[in-house]
Image (cartoon, helix red, strand yellow):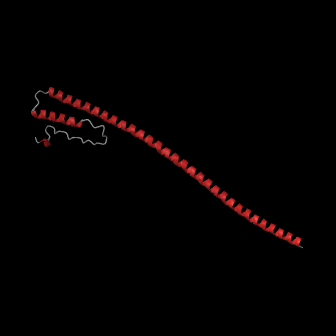
């Protein structure tokens, strides 16, 4: 019977070894499945990260392009404002010259002006020079107050 006992022992050892191998394979399979799930989760996370990176890059690019465009538009608007200010200064100078001419022509055609009329004419020219003074086109935010006109003949505020 020793042969049969040895055979049984051999079979038992083989069965135990098979059982141990089965547990090892099952354990390895579980670990492999967990590793595959982790790899898949990392792949998905990587995809999300890449997607968000692309979105962030495109957003940054859009903001940058928008900023450049706004800066260019601002420059064009500022140039137009300065040109408009300079055109206004030209127009003011033309009005100032016109009023000087009108008052000089009036004085030339009225040689018998009274001192009061001469003062009114002088005050008018001073007011015209203030009213049509050029504006500072390097400071477009500056506000200019319209000067009060001089009192006219017969005006009660003039003290006559």
Q: Which residue is drawn at 71% across and 61% down?
A: 28
**For residue 75, which quarter of the picture?**
top left
Residue 125 at what x, y percent from top left?
18, 34
Name the spot of residue 44 as percent of width and height, x first: 61, 54
Write down the quadrant of residue 137 in the picture: top left
Is 30 above or below relative to 62? Answer: below
The residue positioned 28% from the left and 34% from the top of the image is 89
**Residue that lies at the very extreme toward the bottom in this rendered image:** 1
Foreground residue, 16 or 158?
A: 16
Please tell me in which quadrant of the rendered image residue 109 appears. Answer: top left
Position of 122 with respect to 43 (left or right) is left
Tell me if 116 is positioned left or right of 47 in this view: left
Q: Position of residue 19 (x, y in %)?
A: 77, 67
Foreground residue among 134 and 120 = 134
State how many labels appear. 0
Vertical order, 119 against 3 (above or below): above
> Nearest the camera: 152 or 77?
77
Residue extending farthest to the front is 2
- In the displayed image of the protein, which residue is found farthest to the right? 1
- The percent coordinates of residue 17 (x first, y second) are 78, 66
Question: In the rendered view of the protein, which quadrant contains the N terminus?
Answer: bottom right
The quarter of the rendered structure image containing the C terminus is: top left
- Residue at point 69%, 59% (across, down): 32
């Amino acid at each position: 019977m020793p042969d049969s006992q040895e055979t049984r022992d051999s079979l038992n050892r083989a069965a135990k070894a098979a059982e141990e191998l089965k547990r090892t394979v099952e354990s390895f399979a579980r670990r492999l499945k967990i590793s595959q799930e982790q790899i898949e989760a990392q792949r998905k996370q990587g995809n999300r990260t890449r997607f968000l990176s692309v979105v962030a890059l495109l957003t940054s690019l859009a903001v940058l392009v928008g900023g450049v465009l706004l800066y260019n538009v601002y420059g064009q608007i500022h140039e137009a404002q300065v040109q408009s200010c300079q055109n206004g200064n030209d127009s003011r100078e033309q009005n100032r010259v016109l009023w000087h001419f009108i008052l000089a022509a009036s004085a030339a055609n009225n040689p018998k002006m009274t001192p009061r009329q001469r003062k009114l004419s002088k005050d008018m020219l001073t007011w015209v020079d203030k009213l049509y003074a050029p504006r500072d086109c390097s400071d477009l935010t500056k506000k200019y107050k319209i000067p009060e006109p001089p009192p006219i003949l017969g005006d009660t505020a003039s003290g006559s």
